């Protein structure tokens, strides 16, 4: 198995005035291609910090980080932006779609920052990504014309469109009800079964059981790492859930 | 991001806030329009003064008597009687940069024809007088040399005087009028010149032989001034030197004595006048420029608001691979678009306003294309200058902080 992410003895300190916050205190983590990893732990344990470093939004204070064979720990701001553009897909808790901008244009956005992709190809790839998340009929809709779940699908399409080596999701189901959460998880499972590597921060153990491995943080350390046995298939849960009536 | 995409992104952002974009542009529109209009007014008055001066005779020089110190007592220039016809002949024979020279004497009085009378001024000169003063004869003829020297009772009449004495547009050539009770036969009518830049009616004149005015009207031997043409505008300085030299000699002035005359040129007058209007233009332009500056500050203000409002968008764009330069350019182009669109509308409005001012006030207006180009360049610079700080603030945001911004 090829390691997409290889992190060793990674530390991250924040300096707030006189105080030093040790957000990560020496983390070793290896994630292989095709894995679907749940990152869990109490609030403030360092999950988002970890994800931001994996996503090259932030740089570690100490330690090494090899992403897809490239050492990114010491990279400059611009180099990291280029890596994010080519190798990372983000899905946020609050969707972060551009308002008053159509679903299609939102999905095209990452490719706008890649000058190798011309307008025609950009459009085609965005259409394909929206089709992949089941929104073929909503391409011209604005975010305020879409439900939360649909908005998150647009965001997932956006994270897919640059064909990243890993998709990073920080509490991507945090704003959704349980039915919609399972719909989104079903979509992620689908993508994972087609070979996408996904790292997913969540608080909910049930959501975590949709994945292949869980990594639990506490106080900036990884305290437990285990394969998930008896995985949940989100699609089956959906069928079992009573359809809401009103 | 390539430039096409950047332009599209900036345009979309402006369209998303149409009202705000329009109001922001309004500052620039008003600023540019007023700069264009003010410069058109300033330039117009400069041009009209230049035209006036040219119509007065472009290479013209003249000598006037000036106050002379005698034993420490300053005499008024009006009392000075230093210039004579001999000076005129001396200049004519000795100054080669001067191509035409005429004495000038003048007297104010009442012109009478039948029951009509009209207060006017009679000017006396020689054959060259009309040419030196750029007068043209539209009907009849110029004075002859014999008439000029022989104190003939003939005159040329200005359009205003002719209108007042004979009626609008009537050609009075051949008629006889009286000026200070002396009969003058009209031998020609002068072409209309209109008002000069000081508002004086240049057509309110009679022109007669200098000898006639000197002897029959004023009973004096001196002349009031000497009028000359230099060979060219470039040679007017040389001509002035030559005239000064000759007159100092004919007036028998010693080394240490001041001139009892002064030599002036139209060239000098023209430079003084145009420098006055240049100052006027700069002043008007500067006042209008301030409103343009305020417009620019308006853009800066809105760009700051926009950057703050769109912090999360900036964070998102960065997380998707936007580099600092992409973000910087995005906001910079937005502010340049605001100021350049505003500028284009302002230029059109300025042109329209200039036309309206011209129509309403009959001030001379001269719209300069160069000021339109200047306005365009200035707007681009304003866009860059006032957009720079907000754009740089956006570009320097930390992507994580920006994404978390509430
Ligand atoms: N920019 C920052 N400056 C200072 N301290 C920070 C910063 N970001 C995070 N921290 C600190 O680092 C620690 C880890 O934060 P992090 O956001 O990674 O927690 P988390 O596990 O994602 O929590 P949650 O589940 O609530 O999102 C916390 O103690 C937090 O206060
Ligand atoms: Mg978090």
Image (spheres, helix red, strand yellow):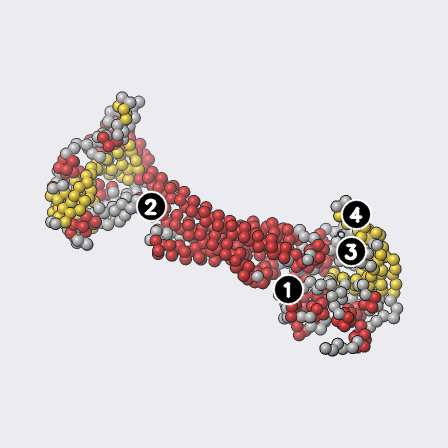
Q: Chain of mark 3?
A: A
Residue A126 in picture, x, y percent from top left: 67, 68
Q: Quadrant of ligand 1?
A: bottom right
Q: Chain of mark 1?
A: A
Q: Nearer the viewer, mark 4 or mark 3?
A: 4
Q: Nearer the viewer, mark 1 or mark 4?
A: 4
Whether ligand 1 has any atom under 8 Å from the Cβ at mark 3 is answered as yes
Q: Look at mark 2 in the image and give the residue it sits on.
A: B49
- Closer to the chain start, of discs 1 and 4, is 4
Q: Look at mark 3 in the image and give the residue it sits on.
A: A49
- Is there any visible trace of residue A3 in the rendered image? no
Q: Are marks 2 and 3 in contact (CB under 8 Å)?
A: no
Separation of residues labelled 4 and 3 (CA atoms):
15 Å
Say which of B192 and B354 sits in front: B354
Q: Nearer the viewer, mark 2 or mark 3?
A: 3
Q: Look at mark 4 in the image and give the residue it sits on.
A: A20
Separation of residues labelled 1 and 3 (CA atoms):
27 Å
Give the residue drawn at x 36%, y 54%: B358
Do the residues at discs 1 and 4 belong to one chain? Answer: yes
Residue furthest to the front: A246
Q: Is residue B345 left or right of residue B389?
A: left
Residue A117 in picture, x, y percent from top left: 66, 63
Q: Are marks 1 and 3 in contact (CB under 8 Å)?
A: no
Q: Nearer the viewer, mark 1 or mark 2?
A: 1
Q: Chain of mark 2?
A: B
For the N terminus of chain B, give its image quadrant: bottom right
Label 3 environment density (alpha carbons within 10 Å; few <14, some 14–19, many ≥20): many
Give the residue drawn at x 24%, y 35%: B226
Q: Is residue B289 above or below residue B342?
A: above
Residue A71 in picture, x, y percent from top left: 78, 53
Q: Chain of mark 4?
A: A
């Amino acid at each position: 198995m090829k390691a997409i992410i290889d992190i060793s003895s990674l530390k991250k300190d924040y300096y707030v005035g006189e105080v030093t916050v040790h957000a990560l205190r020496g983390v070793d983590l290896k994630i292989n291609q095709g894995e679907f990893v749940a990152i869990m732990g109490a609030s403030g344990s360092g999950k988002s910090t970890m994800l931001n470093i994996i996503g090259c939004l932030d740089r570690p204070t100490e330690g090494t980080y090899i992403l897809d064979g490239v050492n990114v720990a010491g990279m400059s701001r611009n180099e990291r932006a280029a890596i994010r553009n080519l190798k990372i897909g983000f899905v946020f808790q609050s969707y972060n779609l551009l308002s008053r901008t159509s679903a299609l244009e939102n999905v095209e956005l990452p490719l706008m920052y890649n000058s190798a992709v011309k307008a025609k190809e950009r459009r085609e790839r965005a259409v394909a990504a929206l089709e992949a998340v089941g929104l073929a009929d909503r391409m011209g809709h604005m975010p305020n014309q879409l439900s939360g779940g649909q908005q998150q699908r647009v965001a997932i399409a956006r994270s897919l469109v640059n064909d990243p080596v890993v998709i990073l999701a920080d509490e991507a189901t945090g704003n959704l009800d349980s039915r919609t959460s399972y719909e989104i998880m079903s979509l992620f499972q689908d993508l994972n079964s087609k070979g996408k590597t996904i790292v997913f921060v969540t608080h909910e153990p049930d959501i975590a059981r949709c994945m292949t491995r869980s990594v639990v943080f506490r106080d900036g350390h990884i305290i437990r790492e285990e394969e998930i046995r008896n995985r949940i298939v989100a699609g089956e849960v959906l069928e079992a859930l009573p359809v809401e009536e009103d | 991001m390539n430039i096409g995409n950047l332009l599209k992104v900036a345009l979309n952002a402006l369209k998303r806030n149409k009202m705000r974009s329009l109001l922001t542009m309004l500052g620039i529109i008003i600023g540019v329009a007023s700069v264009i209009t003010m410069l058109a007014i300033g330039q117009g008055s400069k041009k009209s003064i230049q035209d006036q001066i040219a119509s007065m005779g472009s290479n013209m020089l003249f000598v006037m008597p000036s106050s002379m110190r005698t034993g420490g007592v300053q005499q008024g220039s009006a009392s000075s009687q230093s210039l004579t016809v001999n000076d005129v002949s001396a200049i004519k024979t000795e100054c080669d940069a001067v191509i035409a020279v005429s004495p000038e004497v003048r007297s104010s009085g009442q012109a009478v024809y039948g029951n009509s009378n009209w207060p006017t001024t009679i000017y006396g000169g020689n054959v060259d007088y009309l040419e030196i003063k750029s007068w043209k004869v539209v009907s009849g003829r110029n004075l002859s040399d014999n008439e000029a020297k022989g104190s003939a009772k003939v005159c040329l009449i200005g359009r205003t005087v002719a209108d007042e004495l004979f009626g609008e547009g009537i050609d009075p050539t051949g008629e006889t009028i009286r000026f200070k009770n002396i009969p003058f036969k009209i031998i020609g009518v002068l072409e209309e010149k209109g008002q000069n830049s000081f508002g004086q009616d240049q057509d309110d004149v009679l022109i007669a032989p200098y000898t006639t005015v000197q002897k029959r009207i004023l009973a004096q031997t001196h002349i009031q001034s000497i009028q000359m043409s230099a060979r060219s505008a470039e040679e007017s300085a040389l001509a002035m030197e030559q005239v000064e030299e000759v007159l100092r000699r004919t007036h028998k002035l010693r080394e240490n004595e001041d001139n009892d005359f002064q030599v002036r040129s139209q060239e000098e007058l023209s430079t003084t006048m145009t420098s006055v209007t240049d100052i006027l233009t700069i002043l008007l332009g500067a006042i209008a420029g301030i409103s343009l500056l305020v417009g620019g500050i308006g853009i800066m203000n809105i760009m700051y608001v926009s950057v703050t409002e769109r912090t999360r968008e900036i964070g998102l764009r960065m997380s998707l691979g936007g580099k600092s330069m992409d973000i910087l350019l995005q906001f910079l182009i937005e502010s340049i678009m605001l100021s350049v669109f505003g500028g284009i509308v302002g230029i059109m409005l300025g042109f329209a306003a200039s036309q309206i001012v011209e129509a309403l006030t009959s001030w001379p207006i001269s719209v300069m294309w160069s000021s339109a180009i200047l306005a365009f360049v200035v707007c681009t610079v304003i866009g860059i200058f006032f957009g720079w700080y907000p754009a740089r603030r956006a570009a320097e945001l930390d992507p994580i902080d920006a994404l978390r911004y509430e």
